[in-house]
Image: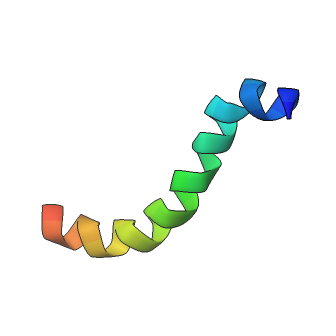
Amino acid sequence: MAQAKSAGKPAAKPAPAKAGKKAAPKAAPRKK
């Protein structure tokens, strides 16, 4: 659990990255 706090920042990036890839294709065309 202690590592989760330290990796909280790096882990938060990969997590949104997974949803970002799914939301990127939908949000990308909408943003552009």
On screen, 16 above or below 30? above
Q: In this view, does 12 lie to the left or right of 1?
A: left
Nearer-the-camera pick, 25 or 15: 15
Question: Where's the N terminus, which quadrant?
Answer: top right
Q: Is residue 1 left or right of residue 31?
A: right
- How far from the left and from the top, in percent, is residue 30? 15, 70
Q: In the image, what residue occupies the spot 29% across and 75% down?
A: 26
- How far from the left and from the top, in percent, is residue 28? 26, 65
Q: In the image, what residue occupies the spot 37% across and 69% down?
A: 23
Nearer-the-camera pick, 11 or 32: 11
Name the quadrant containing residue 25.
bottom left
Question: Where's the C terminus, which quadrant?
Answer: bottom left
| Residue occupying the far front of the picture | 1
- How far from the left and from the top, in percent, is residue 4? 78, 35
On screen, 27 above or below 9? below
Q: How many labels does the image show?
A: 0
Nearer-the-camera pick, 19 or 4: 4
Name the quadrant containing residue 22.
bottom left
Q: In the image, what residue occupies the spot 60% across and 54% down?
A: 15
Q: Is residue 28 left or right of residue 6?
A: left
On screen, 32 above or below 1? below
Q: Is residue 23 left or right of residue 27?
A: right
- How far from the left and from the top, in percent, is residue 13? 58, 43
